[in-house]
Amino acid sequence: MAKKKHTMFVCRNCGSQSLKWLGRCPECGEWDSFDEKDETAFTVSARDGKEPLIVHIADVAMTPADRVDCGSPEFNRILGGGVVRGSYNLISGAPGVGKSTLMLQIALKLAHGRKVLYLSGEESAAQVKLRFGRLSRSDAQSGLFISNENNVDLLRGIVAQEKFDVVFVDSIQSVFSSAVPGIPGSVSQIKDCAVRLLEMAKKDDITLFVIGHVTKSGTIAGPMLLEHMVDTVLYFEGDPTLGYRVLRTTKNRFGSTDEIGIFTMTAQGLEEVENPSQFFVSNREENTSGSALALIMEGTRPFLIEVQSLTTNSNLPQPRRVTSGIDNGRLAMITAVLEKRGDVYFSSFDVFVNVVGGLKLKTPASDLPIAASLLSSMFSIAVPSRVAFIGEMGLAGEIREVPGIELMLKEGARLGLKRIYVPVLRHKPKVKGLELVELKNIFGLIEEIRTMKIFE
């Protein structure tokens, strides 16, 4: 194996490379961000392995993915039925949201019958044990080991020697490789450590969980190479002041990316939420104008959420549009359609829209509920608490069908709803105890809101 040494300059902010030092990075615009790095180019003369370099596709042996039960139904669901053995999993989220707490709980559950190593590069072994003690009443887990070693090269040797089944790394920004210049958390260190951990996971069939920090913009700190390299990318989100957390999958090589998991933070750690709709519907004792219930789908799970709107006369030259939980552009589109197609004008009103519980809506099925809440506030007519809305709104004012309506209707019936407004359905399902009202366009919605009556 021959090697040739040369130097390369790498931007510590974005990872851009240059053959010479530059005062300002041409990619991200950061000043004085280039660090010198020794690069080694390797040329391989021969393969020593027994596996052939090229294999015909018909000769490749297929083995089903061996999934491991994590002991958490919510965590298993978003991974596609459990974590795949030998997979490389990355979890990220805002500071204080509960990433380490979730990984500690998963480590405790996987330690039953398996050999698990939890590496914390940010805390001492005593601090980690203290956190484990708060999450579990058992003082000893037969297969659980703790380490605070930051050197990834030493870590690989220990894991290979002790033959661990599952390894947790908290976090990728805290470990380093002695073969690479730079401090832990730098772009070069994250790249090299990520590659070394990948080799460890795939070579020895070790299930690996890695925690990653996020930047101010909410993206994972470090190069995008980290996300491309792993098998699954999980985002743990939620305001720490709220009572729930949402775990989303943005990349999954072994399953769907549409599922989400709902957790709530308690003194004993994170607990799974069996009925998520309770967090997204306010406890209203009486009907109030400007509020409408929406049925949406997140993956294969239906949710009942509440959308609240407030419209008031504005004294400003440009009325305000304030949203929480929906995109500003979505609100602008809905108000524009109501003005153009329905002659309901918002140009002289301040408009505030809020999704109860802080959930962020991205599905188009929420268009009709948002429009209903806006009309309810404009007309000062309350929508009954046992009425919900489902549907996407087009620019021509038409109401369109959305996927998963049958599951959403069954969830609405289970939660005690009496009437649901839906688009014109091609196949109208029959749900016992539920009245379906089909709307062709927003004119029908406006008429229904104007004549809305409270259930007895």
Image: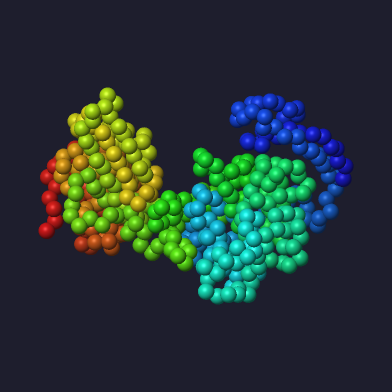
Res 421 seen here: yes
The residue under the point 19% across, 49% down is 288
Extreme-right residue of the structure: 2
Q: Is residue 147 above or below residue 420?
A: below
Quadrant in the picture for residue 89: bottom right
Q: Depth check: 255 or 166 in front?
A: 166
Quadrant in the picture for residue 32: top right
Q: Is residue 391 above or below residue 9?
A: below
Q: Is residue 338 above or below residue 162?
A: above
Q: Could you tell whether 301 is left or right of 31 in the image?
A: left
Count of numbered circles on the image = 0
Q: Position of residue 364 (x, y in %)?
A: 35, 43
The residue under the point 53% across, 71% down is 136
Where, quadrant-wise, is the N terminus in this rendering?
A: top right
The residue under the point 40% across, 62% down is 273
Q: Position of residue 68 (x, y in %)?
A: 57, 66
The residue under the point 55% across, 45% down is 214
Q: Could you tell whether 277 is left or right of 78 in the image?
A: left
Where, quadrant-wise, is the C terminus in this rendering?
A: bottom left
Q: Depth check: 323 or 449 in front?
A: 323
